[in-house]
Every structure is written in C-alpha cells, then in structure tokens.
Image (tube, rainbow, N blue to C red):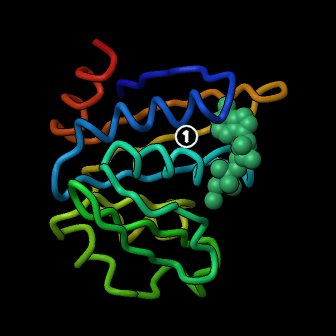
C-alpha cells in the first residue's frame, strides 16, 4: 500500500497543503481524516475549504455531524465523533455519491459505511506545532491524486 508523508510546522502550513490538495479535487471525492483531538483535522478541512473557494468560515461541526458549504464544489464536512453507533445511517451515501467533496473527521467510527475507494489522511502530533500528515490512497483515483500532489 502506497503512502505519502508531509511534515508541517504550523497550522498555516497544514492549511496551505490542504488548499493545494483541494484544487485537485473532483465531484464525489471522499477524504477520511484520522487523528487525535487537536491533531489538526478541522484545520485541514479549513484549508480544503479555501482551496474550494468557499468564503464561509469552516468550524468544527461536532454537534451537528454534517455541515454543507458552497464553493467551486460543495463541501460536505462531517464529524462523526458523537455519533450514537457505527451503523447509524444519517444518509451518508447521498453525500458520498453526491456532486461535492466529502470530508469525514474520525472516519473510522463509521468504517462500515465508508466507500472503499477514498483518500485516508492521518494527522499525528509532533513537538510543538509540528504535525506529520500521512496520505493513504485507496483506489486508482486517489493513487493518481497523490501522485499529482507529490510530483
Ligand atoms: P482536530 O479537528 O483534529 O481536533 P483542530 O484542527 O481543531 O484539531 O485543532 C488543531 C490545533 O492545533 C489548532 O489549534 C491549530 O492551530 C493547532 N496547530 C498547531 N500546529 C499545527 C499544525 N502544524 N497543523 C495543524 N494544526 C496545528
Ligand atoms: Mg475537529
């Protein structure tokens, strides 16, 4: 399994990387974000929003589970941390198969419901403001996407 790593030294750098990634995203793309509390999942999503030309500020949707934003493409921002159980179906498929980009924080919680083809991104705390960001593509589309970003 291929994986691609980038280290960032500030939230701005994480944002910038996500912004660059977002410029390459297409309708129907799904990104699963993993990492402890404060690792930078929401920060990463803010960068994605910038790259999708979304003007509204993206905030943590912890209490709403799904928030929708409009830019070059729609962005469906999910945070499933507080979901009742892994099989609770909140109509996720309609988002995954929709015309927007879906980003899921704590994605493993709904593992069973995730599309098998997706880009999983792991964020790890380093010292101070450093973070290790590891991209693991599943499926040709995401392999291609990673190659493009890291070329
Ligand atoms: P999560 O959604 O994973 O719980 P957040 O993005 O809400 O995490 O919070 C990450 C926090 O860490 C923010 O306060 C952010 O400013 C800070 N931070 C410091 N350095 C970085 C970095 N390199 N990348 C991302 N966030 C960082
Ligand atoms: Mg968050």
Residue placed at 60% from the left, 32% from the top?
Answer: 12
Q: Name the one closer to the observer, 116 or 80.
A: 80
- Residue 68 placement (x, y as % from top left): 37, 73
Question: Is any part of residue 47 visible from this angle?
Answer: yes
Instruction: Determine the image quadrant of residue 62.
Output: bottom right
The local crowd at label 1, few if under 14, some if 14 to 19, many if 20 or more residues have their Cα within 10 Å, is: many
From the image, which quarter does the C terminus lie in?
Answer: top left
- Residue at image point 83% right, 25% down: 127
Q: Give residue 144's position: percent from left, percent from top.
A: 19, 28
Image point (23%, 22%), residue name = 148
Which residue is found at the position 35% from the left and 24% from the top?
2
Is residue 49 found left or right of 45 in the rendered image? left
Q: Is residue 48 above or below residue 3?
A: below
The answer to whether residue 124 is visible is no
- Residue beneath label 1, please? 122
Q: Is residue 35 left or right of residue 23?
A: right
Which of the 4 image quadrants contains residue 133?
Answer: top right
Figure check: 132 above or below 48: above
* Quarter occupied by the N terminus: top left
**Mark 1 residue CB less than 8 A from any atom of ligand 1:** no
Tell which quarter ligand 2 is in: bottom right
The kind of secondary structure element at disc 1 is strand
Give whichever of 72, 79 is nearer the camera: 72
């Amino acid at each position: 399994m291929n994986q691609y790593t980038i280290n960032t030294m500030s939230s701005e750098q994480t944002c910038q990387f996500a912004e660059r990634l977002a410029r390459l995203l297409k309708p129907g793309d799904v990104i699963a974000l993993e990492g402890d509390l404060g690792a930078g999942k929401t920060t990463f999503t803010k960068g994605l929003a910038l790259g999708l030309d979304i003007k509204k500020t993206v905030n943590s949707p912890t209490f709403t589970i799904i928030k929708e934003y409009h830019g070059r493409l729609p962005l469906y921002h999910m945070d499933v941390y507080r979901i009742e159980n892994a099989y609770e179906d909140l109509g996720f498929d309609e988002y995954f198969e929709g015309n927007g980009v879906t980003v899921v924080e704590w994605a493993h919680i709904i593992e069973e419901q995730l599309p098998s083809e997706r880009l999983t991104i792991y964020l790890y705390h380093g010292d101070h403001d450093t973070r290790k960001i590891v991209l693991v593509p599943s499926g040709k589309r995401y392999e291609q996407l990673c190659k493009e970003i890291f070329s």
